[in-house]
Amino acid sequence: MHMTNEEWHEKLTPEEFHVLREKGTERPFSGEYWDSKDLGVYSCRACGAELFSSHSKFDAHCGWPSFYEAMHSDAVNYTDDNTLGMHRIEVTCKKCGGHLGHSFPDGPEPTGQRFCINSLSLKFKPESEKK
Ligand code: FE
């Protein structure tokens, strides 16, 4: 799936574009989902691919929605990120390449992973609306 920056600008708000296409980070506790406990599925806000289930969501007290696993093993890609003087693992949407957030090895069981994801990269669909 390849779209030009012009096409992404038409599809996304400036804030969404900054996070998804320019690897920006929303301010903690500012996003729409960091505190949500509703049951359902979080999809990519750019391309609609299903990324995370509410069943793996937990409160990491960091101000961003956090999950201990991706919904499918092939939903996301991992890339080394050495910016800001840190070593982190960047998490991107496998389908569209959009920046989602980072993965850290300090999450809860059963995976020990913490996916720290921008709300602006996600679109939530409640379980009750699923067919
Ligand atoms: Fe995507």
Image: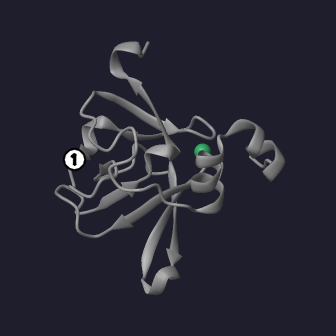
**34 horizontally vs 16: left or right:** left
How packed mark 1 is, by other alpha carbons closer than 10 Å (few <14, some 14-19, many 20 or more), is: some
Q: Secondary structure at mark 1?
A: strand
Position in image of residue 28 (x %, y %): 35, 55
Which residue is more in the foreground, 55 or 46?
46
Q: Residue at x 62, y 41 (%)?
A: 46
Q: Residue at x 30, y 53 (%)?
A: 63
Which residue is more in the foreground, 27 or 46?
27
Residue type beneath disc 1: Phe
Q: Is residue 30 visible?
A: yes
Number of marks: 1
Q: Residue at x 51, y 76 (%)?
A: 81
Position in image of residue 102 (x %, y %): 42, 64
Q: Residue furthest left?
A: 109
Above/below status of 65 relative to 21: above
Pointer 1 residue: 58
Quadrant where the C terminus is found in the figure: top left
Q: Residue at x 46, y 59 (%)?
A: 101
Task: State which quadrant residue 12 falls in.
Answer: top right
